[in-house]
């Protein structure tokens, strides 16, 4: 798609192809719903999270906005921490990121995260966003288990 205010899109993977690859579309409420749609896929014992980048995700330079990639990765890291902590809510205390390469419209940006260590109410994480096996963003995070109104926390 070329034209005024438009940027060339990579070959866009149709949603049907994502479904064939076991991706499931998640239409979430709130901010993540605006940042998506989000796609998820179980990979053995782990989860992968993705957005199919389109023009709504682009910055003025014509590549996916860093904030969109950070949102995707923060969601992935938070979700993995939540599951590792027995489905207790976790909040991001620190997210150290390194942008390594661009993501373009039409590409599937995939986020994965792992727990590195857990101590009490802190969870040390690492994660990345990649396209076709190429890392676009790498990060380390520190998450905290949040006490709920009922006082739940490990």
Image (spheres, grey):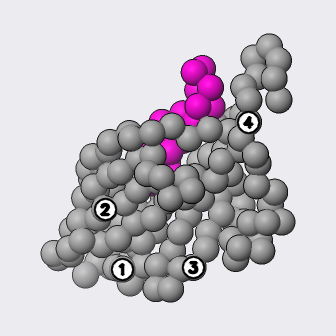
Q: Quadrant of the C terminus?
A: bottom left
Q: Dot 2 surroundings within 10 Å: few (below 14), some, or many (20 or more)?
A: many
Name the residue at 71% across, 41% down: 10
Q: Quadrant of the N terminus?
A: top right
Q: Dot 3 surroundings within 10 Å: few (below 14), some, or many (20 or more)?
A: few
Name the residue at 58% across, 31% down: 63
Q: Earlier in the sequence, mark 4 or mark 2?
A: 4
Q: Nearer the viewer, residue 78 or 89?
A: 78
Q: Earlier in the sequence, mark 3 or mark 1?
A: 3
**Image spot of residue 91 (x, y percent):** 35, 59
* Residue that sits furthest to the top in the current view: 4
**Image spot of residue 29 (x, y percent):** 66, 57
- Residue 84 - label: 1
**Image spot of residue 5 (x, y percent):** 75, 17
Please, is residue 105 above or below residue 44 in the view? above
Q: Is residue 59 left or right of residue 143?
A: right
**Marks 4 and 3: which is nearer the front?**
4
Please, is residue 31 above or below residue 87 in the view? above
- Residue 42 - label: 3
**Marks 4 and 1: which is nearer the front?**
4
Q: Dot 4 surroundings within 10 Å: few (below 14), some, or many (20 or more)?
A: some
Q: Is residue 126 left or right of residue 89?
A: left
> For the residues marked 4 and 3, what is the alpha-carbon distance in whole angstroms?
28 Å
Secondary structure under tag 3 reads strand
Q: Which residue in the structure is indicated by mark 2?
A: 126
Q: Nearer the viewer, residue 5 or 142?
A: 5
Q: Earlier in the sequence, mark 3 or mark 2?
A: 3
Q: Is residue 127 left or right of residue 144?
A: right
* Residue that sits furthest to the left in the current view: 119
């Amino acid at each position: 798609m070329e034209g005024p205010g438009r940027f060339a899109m990579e070959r866009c993977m149709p949603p049907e192809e994502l479904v064939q690859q076991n991706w499931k579309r998640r239409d979430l409420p709130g901010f993540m719903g605006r940042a998506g749609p989000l796609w998820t896929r179980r990979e053995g014992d782990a989860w992968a999270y993705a957005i199919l980048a389109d023009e709504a995700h682009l910055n003025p330079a014509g590549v996916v906005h860093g904030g969109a990639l950070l949102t995707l990765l923060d969601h992935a890291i938070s979700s993995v921490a939540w599951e590792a902590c027995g489905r207790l809510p976790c909040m991001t205390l620190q997210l150290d990121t390194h942008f390594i390469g661009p993501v373009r419209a039409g590409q599937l940006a995939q986020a994965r995260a792992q727990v590195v260590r857990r101590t009490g109410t802190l969870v040390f994480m690492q994660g990345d966003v990649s396209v076709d096996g190429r890392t676009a963003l790498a990060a380390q995070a520190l998450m905290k288990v949040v006490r709920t109104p009922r006082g739940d926390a490990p």
